[in-house]
Image (cartoon, helix red, strand yellow):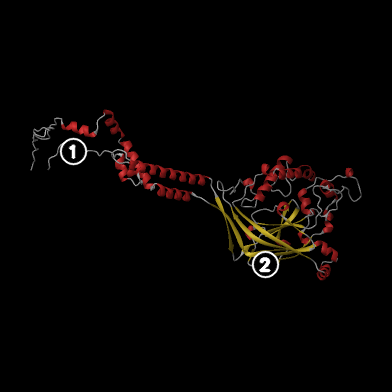
Amino acid sequence: QAPTSLLEEPRRPHRRDLAAFAGTSTLHGLAHICRSGQLGVRQALWALAFVASLAFFLYQAARSALFYLEHPHVTTLDEEAAQKMVFPAVTICNINRFRHSALTDADIFHLANMTGLPPKDRDGHKASDLLYPDPDMADIVNRTGHQLDDMLKNCSFNGENCSAENFTVVYTRYGKCYTFNGDRNKARMTRQSGMGNGLEIMLDIQQEEYLPIWRETNETSFEAGIRVQIHSQDEPPYIHQLGFGVSPGFQTFVSCQEQRLTYLPQPWGSCQASLKEEQILPGYESYSIAACRLQCEKEAVLQNCQCRMVHMPGNETICSPNVYIECADHILDTAVEDFQERCICPMPCNLTRYGKEISMVRIPNKGSARYLARKYNRNETYIRENFLVLDIFFEALNYEAIEQKKAYNLAGLLGDIGGQMGLFIGASVLTILEILDYICEVRTSGGIQQVLSSSGETVAEILSSLENRQIPPLTGDFTVSSSPATPTKPCPQNR
């Protein structure tokens, strides 16, 4: 065994100084700055270049971080073809709400403020002499509204005949209306585009049933025709604001283009993925603006009038005709005026809407007028004033996909910061780990350094003082001396 001494005993390695760390660090430029010795011009220039590069990096990194916090988005537009497409829901309403011949004496009495008709019975009694039971507004609207069996003269879809049984009853501000293809679980498909490959209906608007105008009211209408709304099966009709008119005496062609819109939620956008259950109408699985507005209008009317209107969802009591005029209509008009304050309906994150191009030609011509007059036992004037044809079809079997996308996500932010870090200071994630490792090394050895620095002695001075001391030998008698002239007795070896 080789002789050993106390000074040759293995000791715990001391921490590296800054110069040693800089020499092994992957951070560019640090080795040229932290050299042993006095600070020279070369080191000062390297330090200046390093600080400038670090400042540029921090500036660019801060700009990237601020841009990310703005949550920007971009909108993309793409047109995609399809083999077949779901045909939209089509809701139609006669502009006239009540058929004159269907109104009873009690109906005329109760609806006097709405229709403007004088309340009297067949014997001409005055209103003060009439006694009628309380009105049922839902029954009045359902019974006196225009019946589709009487209005629908011809119907075809994709070249196949259809009838009033293919329509469902729906109530709107126009009263009793009808929706074709409104069930999303049984939605009809179309495999061809162009005229003749959609819905084509011929209607009789029955102008002879329109109410006579004795005086103007909020419900008085001077138009003749129908209102039409083309919408998705996921949303209820909001036809009094979103519908378009179709006049009698014309064949109206409506060319549709489906648009599928995808919006981003907060904080990149302002869409609403889902709301509370009370803000979604029964029968509709997804949120829509129309459903939200109907629910909001219902809450406003219910709060102020303690009842709801016929077209509003729910099981609450339906308002009487007098409350319609005195309270409900006024509340709805007020809700429209300050809609943004009283009813907030954010955009849904997924929305399907239909762009429309409308054109029309006059019908009937002289020959078809005589034929239709004989067929439906009417005169030619009646045919021209009451009959209309509505043709709705897809322009092409494709749809526009409009989508909001994140313009700058977390991966982009990290990529930009990493690229700028490598460009300006030549660092990476591992460089950051090296710095953290060195900081931990300094902190763990900070106690020894504090003792050494507080005594004012360096490691070299302590070692020099140890050499001048008498140290007992491990085996045998020998001394350790700082004098070079005195030989040291070697330690005995055991073989």
For the residue pair 128 and 365, the one nearer the viewer reads as 365
Q: Does 182 sit left or right of 6 as displayed?
A: right
The label number, if any, that marks residue 109 in the structure image: none
The label number, if any, that marks residue 194 in the structure image: 2
Within 10 angstroms of label 2, few (less than 14), some, or many (20 or more) residues?
Answer: some
Q: Which of disc 2 and disc 1 is earlier in sequence?
A: 1
Residue receiving disc 1: 9
Please tell me in which quadrant of the rendered image residue 493 appears. Answer: top left
User: Which residue type does callout 1 highlight?
Assistant: Glu
Percent across and percent down for residue 374 are 84, 69
Within 10 angstroms of label 1, few (less than 14), some, or many (20 or more) residues?
Answer: few
Residue 304 vertical placement versus 411 (above, below): above
Q: Secondary structure at mark 2?
A: loop
For the residue pair 182 and 223, the one nearer the viewer reads as 223
Residue at the spot 49% in from the left edge and 45% down from the top edge: 63
Q: Secondary structure at mark 1?
A: loop
For the residue pair 477 and 202, the one nearer the viewer reads as 477
User: Which residue type does callout 2 highlight?
Assistant: Gly
Please tell me in which quadrant of the rendered image residue 39 appears. Answer: top left
